[in-house]
Image: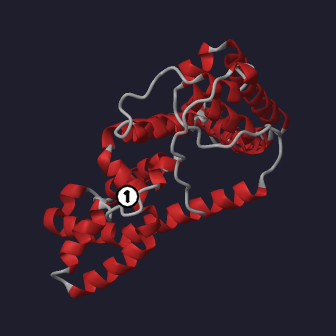
Amino acid sequence: MVRVLLADPTTRRHYLTVGIAQAVVIVALVVMFSRWKNDVAHELGKRTGVELWLVYSAAILSSLQLFQWIVIALSRDHHTVLSREASVRTGLEPEDEPLTPRVWLNIPWLKKKLKQRWRALWLFAWGVPVLWVADRLGRIMYGNALGETGLMPLLASLWGAWWFVVFTAGKSERAWTQENARAPWFLRAWDWLGSRIAPLGAYGRRWARVTHPVFSPAACVEQRPWGLMGLALARAVSALPLVRCFLRPTIPVAAAHLLAAEDHPARSANPPASALAAVGALAPDAAPASPPRPAAGARPPG
């Protein structure tokens, strides 16, 4: 996707201008608001050598992450335009409407992000009791062989990684279009247990109601696990300070391509002239009409 954005001179200029400008502003804010230096200075008398270096690194990284979130939140319109350009240039139906980018705080978008974060936390929490029971059973069966922490850190990490992959797929609207998607693997396994132990069945029914809104992206992950796992890894890398400025616009487009590959295996790499005109690569009067394509499904609110 990055190569696509760098291929055309006009798109390349826009892409690099946005990414570099965001990175410069983030670094400048970290330098200007240097409270982290006071925190490190407070630790000078307590830490030495490697420990002091780790304190410095943690303070710098936390400041970079904070200001990166603020800068991208204010200038996310530019990333939306870049995602649309990448979609058009790879022959994919854009999921975003054309817009004129500006620097502003989009309150509806902010509320939506907060709701998504809460939903992700709530979905994770519903699996924690099950993980705790599995950890207890592991301790009973294997005793001290599992160490002091037992299986809980490993199980919680795998559980969180699963949901991270699901919501990576959910970056594309195509992940939310399966109206009759079946329940995820863990609910199917729990239903099997619940059919034999009644109290488990009651918990499973409540768990299914909570999880039902994300059945569609979860089904997408089960259908295309390896590609979406790789994309989730790339998304995790893109969360690094300053890297996000350059990779964030590509994640939704890559997810859309992975989800559309099965239905459209022979998708053309050369977009129609009308699509290029939509992102300003050609004059509108030079673009012939292109045949209509089905619109992508809409992501549910929240």
Residue 243 in the image: above or below residue 121: above
Residue at the image point whose x is 55% and y is 24% from the top: 271
Determine whether the residue tagged by mark 1 lies in a helix, strand or loop: helix
Residue at the image point whose x is 42% and y is 69% from the top: 212
The residue positioned farthest toward the bottom in the image shown: 198
Return the x and y of residue 187 as percentages of the image width and height: 30, 68
Answer whether residue 157 is visible to the viewer in this image: no
The quadrant of the image that shows the C terminus is bottom right
Return the x and y of residue 157 as percentages of the image width and height: 38, 52
Is 75 positioned to the left or the right of 297 in the image? right
Q: Nearer the viewer, residue 184 or 128?
A: 184
Residue at the image point whose x is 57% and y is 65% from the top: 118
* Location of residue 136 (image quadrant): bottom left
Residue at the image point whose x is 42% and y is 54% from the top: 217
Query: What residue is disc 1 on?
Result: 156
Answer whether residue 92 is visible to the viewer in this image: yes
Return the x and y of residue 105 as percentages of the image width and height: 80, 50
* Location of residue 42 (image quadrant): top right
